Amino acid sequence: MTTIGERAGPAGAEGAAPGRTAWPDAVRVGLTALVIAHHCAITYSHIPAWTYYEPPTDGTATLLDAFVATNQAWFMGAFFLISGWFVPGSVDRHGVAGFVRGRLLRLGLPFLAFLLVLKPVFYLPLFAGQDGAWLQAFLAPDPGPLWFVLLLLVFSLVYALVRGVREARPVGTGPVPGVLAVAGAGLALGAATWAWWIVVPNGTFWAVLPSAGYLPQYALCFVIGIVGGRRGWFERLRPRTGWACAALAVVTGLAWLTVAVLGGGAAAGGGTAVSAVAAVLNGLFTVFVIVAVLVAARRWLDRSGPVARFLSTNAFAVFVLHPPIVAWLGVALAGFAAPAAAKALVLFALAAPLCWAAAWSVRRIAVVRRVV
């Protein structure tokens, strides 16, 4: 099958998954679908962070807020972890120069194509009715969800630079992390996040990184992916570790949401005790839920087939194409009256299959297929 590594998708890097297993691809597909659901939810939530946005008029939007906040706490970190997993093997096979060329082709070109072609279409609903709407949409500095592709490219080039001046350690196994080791990683991430939030409070928006408060998570998860992939952790995580992490993810996730809601702005940063608790709970939740997802996917989703191959092969193209599709479907549904949560579900039900169909259509072009 086409593995997560053979397509430079949002969760991938060049190279085949160990043993050409199917479950890392399943994680990538699930995360890609979750990204679509995330942006559908934002469209009707209390978070005006999408180019087409409908202010909510009913209480179900609070459910969408919780869904968005919970996703934001872990799913992009999971993308970076799986991306890091396959990076060292790609450098081993292609060398540093070959790896850099591949990254620039498979990440740099889609990023530029989005900026020049798709970003104006994505931003047009935001400037509709204004003079020079197309020009404003084209000049908008925010790359939308493609910030992830840019940051992954930066991380990959930094790793290539390190490998260029230092030999990689031999691939080994060693002890597989248990619950205590996972919790230790969560505490370390929480401490780094709290220190970062003092300077860059959670919720800070940078044009090239909208979720700037989560930068430590993205970097640490990428590093964990590299180290864990080298040591074979992800294929050997014990089922009991996954079950324990799933339970702890529920506990820490609910606790984090409670602190975030009750603490308000104090939980977002500034060096307060409340922000410290929020950061630690956030870090623990992140690693617990990622480990639980990896173990569950390995146990129940390690199977291939035509549908799985179709979804996986087109996942990166879906990630690149989905922003304007979701935004304009939202415009098309403007006259549809329904509670916010129901409307988000309808938008997702339409957007997900349309995104995969569009990706399949675009990838029928040979030159596009070489890149995405």
Image: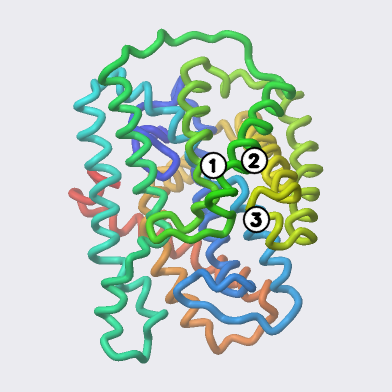
Reading the image, the residue beneath label 3 is 268
- Mark pair 3, 1: CA separation: 18 Å
Q: Are marks 2 and 1 in contact (CB under 8 Å)?
A: yes
Amino acid type, callout 2: Thr
Q: Earlier in the sequence, mark 3 or mark 1?
A: 1
Reading the image, the residue beneath label 1 is 77
> How far from the left and from the top, in percent, is residue 151?
38, 45
Amino acid type, callout 3: Ala
Q: Nearer the viewer, residue 172 or 342?
A: 172
The answer, for residue 304, to whether it is visible in the render is no
Q: Residue at 54%, 51% (x, y): give it.
A: 213
- Mark pair 2, 1: CA separation: 8 Å
Helix, strand or loop status at disc 3: loop
Q: Nearer the viewer, residue 349 or 235?
A: 235
Q: Earlier in the sequence, mark 2 or mark 1?
A: 1
The numbered mark at residue 305 is none
